[in-house]
Amino acid sequence: MVTILKTGTTEEQKKMLIRWFEDQGLRVNEYMDGDQVVLGLIGDTSRIDVEMLELLDIVDRVVLIEEPFKKANRKFHPEDSMITIGGTDSTEATIGAGHFAVIAGPCSVETEDQIIEVAQAVKAAGATMLRGGAFKPRTSPYDFQGLKAEGLKLLLEAKKATGLPIVTEIMNQDHLDLFCDVDVIQVGARNMQNFELLKELGHCDKPILLKRGLANTIKELLMSAEYIMSGGNENVILCERGIRTFETYTRNTLDLSVIPVLHDLTHLPVVVDPSHATGHANLVEPMAMAATAGGADGLMIEVHNNPPMALCDGAQSLTPKQFEETMERVRKIREVVK
């Protein structure tokens, strides 16, 4: 339930109403929609007499929310969320509410020279954050699983060298202590419904990049975001990375319709990953352009300095030169759509 107060409601009147809601066992989220105060109510609202509430002098209207996701719901938070990343030991990056971000880097951190070279290249081309996998979930137990804690150390070296905030994936809540200096924690597609992990991330103070699962609905993605936000961490970035269909010419099927659908349902920023979606480097640029034109708040693109020799996902990785060319085209699209 959402209660929208009339313009001119005093601070004392608002506080009295909030106290009354809390006395009914409800949690209250307060937001501004223009010059009106919006009170989002979380909990069992069945005991609230809506007609009585609407008769109060300070109440403009009451909106009932049928969707099970509350804190992620645009009805609770009409304005787009803007998430600020880094800024202490790295360059500050912003995403959402008109701010466009590009996250780029290799699928896996392999060596110090490799990650620093790629970081310098993507920064020069206009990337605002550096991605790189230290813990790698792989379908085969025999594939490269990442450098783990050592990979995180190398990412931090690249951060020192370039100032780029770093984005990397967590596999297990037991690893959280290793992510103290990571700027954005990524939850991969396979962990989108790892609810115990999501609960733990709800208690941390870092932005979370949440990828849509391979076969998950939009509603399920938003409910996973709700797990994180209900724990107190409202800095969630949603990521579309393609879903599994019957098509085999691409690695997954990139669902670009998810961009306007999510923007209608939620205030959270939406990022698109054309690398994992297509699985082919030659398809990344056109899909990055299409996602940008479709209103995405950012892109996540894999870049490797030597894709044929990459230990993970070389086929979908752009070279630094290809990434530079893609960024130039993305900038042109942004000039049109923004």
Image: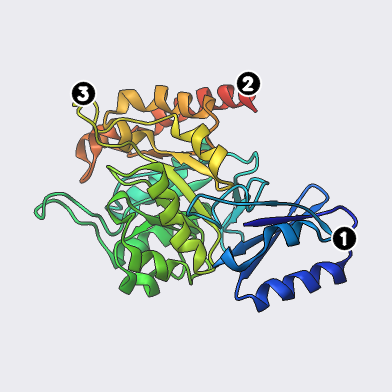
Of mark 2 and mark 3, the one earlier in the sequence is: 3
- Which x, y percent locates residue 253? 30, 30
| Number of residues whose C-alpha sits closer than 10 Å to that of mark 3, classed few (under 14), some (14–19) or many (20 or more) | few
Q: Nearer the viewer, residue 100 or 160?
A: 100
Q: Residues within 10 Å of mark 1 (few under 14, many from 20)?
A: some
The secondary structure type at the circle numbered 1 is: loop
- The picture places residue 215, in percent across and down from the top left corner, at 27, 42
Q: Which numbered disc flags the more N-terminal residue, 1 or 3?
A: 1
Element class at badge 2: helix
The quarter of the rendered structure image containing the C terminus is: top right
| Residue 1, position as x, y percentages in the image | 62, 57
The residue that disc 3 covers is 249
Q: Camera-side residue: 170 or 109? A: 170
- The kind of residue tagged 3 is Tyr
Name the mark on residue 9. 1
Q: Nearer the viewer, mark 2 or mark 1?
A: 1
The image's mark for residue 336 is: 2
> Which circle, 1 or 3, is nearer the viewer?
1
Of 314 and 72, the residue lying toward us: 72
Q: Are marks 1 and 3 in contact (CB under 8 Å)?
A: no
